[in-house]
Image (tube, rainbow, N blue to C red):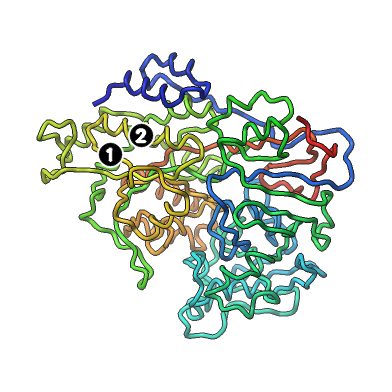
C-alpha cells in the first residue's frame, strides 16, 4: 500500500503544470497539514463606461460533451440545457436572496392555510416569445403534462402528487386534476393535500414554468421531448428567444420584444460549446464575453487583465454515492438489497474517513472548493448543517472500522476480503472531463488502497456524462460506487433526491426513518422554521450514520466576464437579469 509521501508525489506528477507544485512541496508528504482558505469574489460587474446600442454578447458554454437540446424545463434533464434556458425561460415567480418566493414577478400569489390553497394571479397582457398570449391555462397545462400517465420525464413525484387530484390523474382514473381551478385568463387556484415549505421556495413544489399549450398540445406527451417544437422552435418567457440552433454545438438567441420587463438591451447572445481544456486561452484572447470557468485551472487565468472574475457558492454538492439496491420501474419505488456489495455501513463510513478533502481542496482547487460536512450547501443558512462534523480525514479510524466489521487481508495480497472471506473488488465510476476529475478520482482510489480496499475504475476509464447518468439510472451492475453532483437548485428539500420512491435516488437507499423524516419536511408542521430546522438536522445526522452518500465538496462558481460587459449580476435573488446587460464596445477587450 502507498504511504502518504508516495501519494503526494503521485499527485504532483498528475498535477504537473497546474501551478500547484509549491503547495505540494509545502505539505512535505503530510497530507493532513493542508488547510483551505476560501476565496471571496464580487457578484456584480461594475463598469462605468458608456454603453453602445445593441450588439452581440458571446457566451461560452463550458462542456465536455454536446448539449441535448431539449429547450423546456418540463422535459430537460441536462445541466447544459438548463444553462441555455437561463436566457430563454423564466419563472413566473420572483425570489429573494433566501430563495423565498416574492410578489415581484410575472405572478403574485395568495395563500389560504385553512383551505390549503394557493391562488395565483398573472400580470395582464403577458406573452410568450412568439407573441401568443400567456395565460394561467399554460400553468395548468404544465401540471397536466407532468402528471400525465405517458410523461417520460423525472419531475413527477411526491411534490406533484401533493396537488389534490394529481394522483388520480396520473394513474389514469381521472381526466382532469381536480385540485387546480382556472377562474379566468389571469387567475388560478391550486389546492394541496398539505401546505409545506417547498411551496414557497424558489424551485420548489409550486411549479413556476408554464408550458405553451398553443404550440405543443397536438403532440402526444410521450413524444414531446423529441419534437421539433422543443428542439428547433422553442418558445419561452425569458428575455431572449432561440433564433438558430446548431444541434449540440451552438445557439443564437435574439432579443425577445415580448419580454414582460421590456425588450433587452442586447440584440443577440451567441452561445457556443467550448471544452474546459481551451476555455482559458479563449477568454485570454477575448473570443468570449462570459464563461463559467473550471476552478482547477484558476491559477492560469486569475490575473488576466481583460476579464473580471465574479463568484458565488454553487447550489450543488459533490458527493460519492453507493449502489445499495435497484429500482422497480413498474412499482415506482426503490428496493434496498441488504446483500449488495456496499450494504455494510461500516464499509461506506471507512471509505469516507479515508479521504482527505481538505488536502484536495487546498492543493487542487485553490480554495474554490470547501470540504462539505453535509449534503446541503452552507448558502442555505439555517438549513445547512453548520454544527455537523462530517467525515473528517481519519485513516486510522477507517482501518479500525474495517477491522471491526471483519474486512481483513487474510491472504496477504495487500487488499481486504469480505467478512465471508471472498475477494472484495469495488468498481468506482465518475464523469469524464470537468474540474480535474481524473486527478481527483486517481487520488481517491489511492487513498482507498491505503486502507486496503481494492478499488478500480468502473469500465476502466472515466465515463461520458450522458452515459454515466444512464448507467446510474439503469442500476448498471458494473458500478458499486460513484462520484456525482446533487444539483440542489433553490430548494434544499431532499425529497426528489432521497425519498424511497424517487427515480433520482440513484443509490436506491431506502429506510423507514429516512422516509419518515422526508415526509415530515412536506407537511404543514414544517412551515414553522424551528420545526423545519430540527427535521433537517435529524435527517443529516441519519445520512452521517448510514452513509448512503459521502458529501465531498461545496464549490465556488467562477464567472469570467470580459471587461466590455456592463450590468452583469450573479447575486442570488437579484432583480436584474440578462435584459439589463450591455456592452461598452463593439469588440471585446483582448
**Depicted 374 relative to depicted 498: above or below:** above
**Depicted 173 relative to depicted 407: above or below:** below
Q: Give the x, y percent position of residue 218.
A: 63, 80
Dot 2, how many residues are within 10 Å of its Cα: few (below 14), some (14-19), or many (20+)? many
Dot 1, how many residues are within 10 Å of its Cα: few (below 14), some (14-19), or many (20+)? many
Quick one: quadrant of the C terminus? top right
Q: Give the x, y percent position of residue 421.
A: 11, 43
Find residue 455 and name its label: 1
Direction from residue 543 to residue 380 in the image, left or right: right
Quick one: quadrant of the N terminus? top left
Q: Residue at x 47, y 85 (%)?
A: 173
Q: Residue at x 81, y 57 (%)?
A: 261
Q: Is residue 86 visible in this depiction of the protein? A: yes
Q: Residue at x 66, y 47 (%)?
A: 272
Name the image quarter holding residue 291: top right
Direction from residue 53 to residue 240 in the image, left or right: left
**Depicted 463 relative to depicted 447: above or below:** below
Amino acid at each position: 500500500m502507498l504511504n502518504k509521501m508516495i501519494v503526494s508525489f503521485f499527485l504532483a506528477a498528475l498535477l504537473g503544470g497546474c501551478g500547484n507544485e509549491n503547495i505540494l512541496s509545502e505539505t512535505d508528504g503530510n497530507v493532513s497539514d493542508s488547510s483551505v482558505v476560501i476565496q471571496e469574489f464580487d457578484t456584480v460587474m461594475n463598469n462605468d463606461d458608456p454603453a453602445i446600442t445593441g450588439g452581440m454578447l458571446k457566451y461560452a458554454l463550458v462542456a465536455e460533451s454536446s448539449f441535448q437540446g431539449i429547450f423546456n424545463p418540463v422535459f430537460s434533464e441536462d445541466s447544459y440545457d438548463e444553462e441555455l434556458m437561463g436566457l430563454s425561460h423564466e419563472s413566473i415567480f420572483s425570489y429573494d436572496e433566501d430563495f423565498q418566493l416574492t410578489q415581484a414577478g410575472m405572478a403574485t400569489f395568495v395563500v389560504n392555510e385553512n383551505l390549503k390553497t394557493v391562488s395565483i394571479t398573472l400580470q395582464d397582457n403577458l406573452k410568450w416569445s412568439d407573441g401568443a398570449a400567456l395565460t394561467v391555462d399554460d400553468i395548468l397545462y404544465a401540471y397536466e403534462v407532468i402528471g400525465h400517465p405517458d410523461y417520460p420525464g423525472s419531475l413527477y413525484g411526491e411534490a406533484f402528487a401533493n396537488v389534490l387530484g394529481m394522483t388520480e390523474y396520473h394513474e389514469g382514473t381521472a381526466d382532469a386534476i381536480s385540485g387546480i381551478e382556472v377562474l379566468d385568463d389571469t387567475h388560478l387556484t391550486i389546492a394541496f393535500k398539505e401546505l409545506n415549505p417547498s411551496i414557497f421556495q424558489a424551485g420548489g413544489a409550486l411549479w413556476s414554468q408554464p408550458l405553451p399549450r398553443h404550440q405543443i398540445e397536438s403532440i402526444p406527451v410521450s413524444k414531446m421531448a423529441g419534437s421539433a417544437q422543443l428542439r428547433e422552435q422553442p418558445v419561452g418567457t425569458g428575455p431572449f428567444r432561440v433564433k438558430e440552433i446548431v444541434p449540440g454545438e451552438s445557439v443564437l438567441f435574439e432579443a425577445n420584444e415580448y419580454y414582460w420587463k421590456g425588450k433587452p438591451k442586447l440584440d443577440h447572445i451567441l452561445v457556443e460549446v467550448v471544452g474546459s481544456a481551451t476555455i482559458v486561452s479563449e477568454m485570454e484572447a477575448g473570443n468570449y464575453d462570459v464563461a463559467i470557468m473550471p476552478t482547477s485551472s484558476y491559477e492560469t487565468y486569475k490575473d488576466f487583465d481583460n476579464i473580471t472574475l465574479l463568484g458565488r457558492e454553487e447550489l450543488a454538492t459533490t458527493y460519492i454515492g453507493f449502489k445499495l439496491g435497484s429500482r422497480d420501474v413498474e412499482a415506482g419505488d426503490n428496493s434496498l438489497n441488504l446483500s449488495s456489495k456496499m450494504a455494510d455501513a461500516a464499509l461506506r463510513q471507512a471509505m469516507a474517513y479515508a479521504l482527505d478533502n481538505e488536502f484536495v481542496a487546498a492543493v487542487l482547487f485553490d480554495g474554490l472548493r470547501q470540504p462539505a460536512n453535509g449534503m446541503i450547501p452552507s448558502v442555505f443558512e439555517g438549513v445547512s448543517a453548520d454544527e455537523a462534523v462530517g467525515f473528517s480525514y481519519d485513516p486510522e479510524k477507517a482501518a479500525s472500522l474495517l477491522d471491526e466489521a471483519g474486512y481483513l487481508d487474510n491472504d496477504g495480497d495487500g487488499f481486504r476480503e469480505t467478512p465471508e472471506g471472498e475477494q472484495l473488488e469495488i468498481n468506482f465510476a465518475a464523469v469524464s472531463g470537468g474540474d480535474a476529475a481524473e486527478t481527483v478520482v486517481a487520488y481517491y482510489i489511492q487513498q482507498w488502497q491505503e486502507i486496503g480496499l481494492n478499488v478500480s475504475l468502473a469500465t476502466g476509464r472515466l465515463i461520458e456524462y450522458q452515459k454515466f447518468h444512464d448507467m446510474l439510472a439503469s442500476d448498471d451492475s458494473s458500478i458499486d460506487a460513484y462520484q456525482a453532483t446533487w444539483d440542489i437548485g433553490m430548494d434544499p428539500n431532499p425529497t426528489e433526491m432521497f425519498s424511497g420512491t424517487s427515480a433520482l435516488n440513484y443509490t436506491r437507499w431506502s429506510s423507514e426513518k429516512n422516509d419518515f423524516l422526508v415526509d415530515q419536511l412536506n407537511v404543514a408542521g414544517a412551515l414553522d422554521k424551528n420545526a423545519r430546522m430540527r427535521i433537517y438536522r435529524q435527517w443529516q445526522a441519519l445520512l452521517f450514520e448510514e452513509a448512503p452518500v459521502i458529501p465531498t465538496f461545496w464549490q465556488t462558481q467562477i464567472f469570467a466576464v470580459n471587461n466590455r460587459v456592463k450590468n452583469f449580476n450573479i447575486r442570488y435573488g437579484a432583480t436584474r437579469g440578462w435584459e439589463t446587460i450591455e456592452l461598452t464596445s463593439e469588440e471585446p477587450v483582448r
